[in-house]
Amino acid sequence: MRILHTADWHFGRTLEGRSRMAEQEAFVDELVEIVKKEQIDIILVAGDVFDSVNPPAAAEQLFYESLARLSDKGRRPVAVISGNHDHPDRISAARTLMCAHNIFLFGRPQAAVCQIDVPSCGETMMLAPLAYPSESRLAELLSSDCKETTMRNRYDDRIRDLLAAMAASFTVETVNVAMSHLYVAGGRTSDSERPIEVGGAYTVAAESLPKAAQYVALGHLHRPQDVKRAKTAARYSGSPLAYSFSEAGQAKSVTVVDVHPGGAAKVAEIPLAAGKPLIRWKATEGLAQVYRWCEEGRDRSSWIDLEIYVTESLTMEEIDRLRKLHPGFVHIRPVLPNRAEEMMEMSREPLSLEEMFHRFYERQTGGQTPDEELVRLFLELAAEEEKEGEGE
């Protein structure tokens, strides 16, 4: 059986207001070609197909068109689970209709295994599809103790038990695969994974992934990577596009897995070419250096995060000229001499959220110090925002 594993499409996502729809459509075109060329038997999509619980209509249309093209009129099974960005009920709403076309949609986490017959290879997959298992979606209070360590241990226990219960249905005659959207401890993150469980309570130990599975297909982390310390082959396929400048320079890919009943999984990475690269420019020589790069056509088809060192603030005319010279400028950040020194100082020491707020406030107000009530309010709002992210 030849499996293609992908995740974190984030259809509907923008880059500072700039549409990525054309790039996402190009990714789907490329994915369809890979599926044909590599003679893929079944496709697994490990969550976050959308970027929000209420995606734009164009994003939903692209999603359903993608499923139709990939399934090839039901000849190729496709299984999709919801991620933290997806609304679980929106993902599973068309489940009954889709099943008739060999497309399997899983919105909410349940301890049920899905048996999928794969006609192109004459084999059967037993799939343990654990959709994003937050405490709210599990509809369980895992612990009344608010301590993060206690919560993390209880959460890890619950996810391990769920996966083990599903793995009990695996057989020696089937290809046995688990799929989920979660954070496994030790994974390398980027800014575009919103702060939900990374480093927090919703963390699962690599050893908790089911050993009985021949492969574990994971979603959530945008950097393609294997899961170290797992008792079986486990991997994040990564996102198909770079969604934040923290992903600048990352190679994007999908994962292809060859596996037969009772055998070990052979995992390969297929690189993707679709999507504009996200590039950082650091112009230490000022405007003249940026003009020269633009005239040379440097990174013409990329999104650019520009940090430009200047002796005085840029005028609106200079900023407008830069944007006309290169349509890919997303951020244009002037760095003045005193600001450069401050940035160097900040880079030398880790700062808490409260310390960062103090420095930001002082910089914006010309040296004034925020009062304690304002700091408290800011920290409360930041905590509420993170908690809302956990519930998405």
Image (spheres, rainbow, N blue to C red):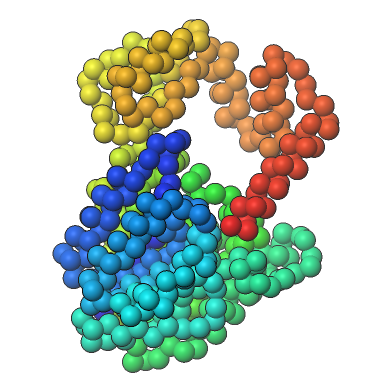
- In this view, the residue farthest toward the left is 37
The residue shown at (68%, 37%) is: 353
The image shows a total of numbered marks equal to 0
Question: Split into 4 quadrants, where in the image is the N terminus?
Answer: bottom left
- Is residue 213 in view from this perspective? no
| Image-based side of 291 in relation to 126, left or right | left
Residue 136: x and y in percent read: 65, 66
The residue shown at (42%, 39%) is: 15
Residue 149: x and y in percent read: 71, 62
Q: Quadrant of residue 134?
A: bottom right
The residue shown at (41%, 53%) is: 57
- Is residue 117 in view from this perspective? yes
Q: Quadrant of residue 139?
A: bottom right
Question: Split into 4 quadrants, where in the image is the C terminus?
Answer: bottom right
Residue 3: x and y in percent read: 29, 72
| Image-based side of 372 in relation to 298, left or right | right
The residue shown at (32%, 49%) is: 24
Nearer the observer, 19 or 127 = 19
| Image-based side of 300 in relation to 99, left or right | left
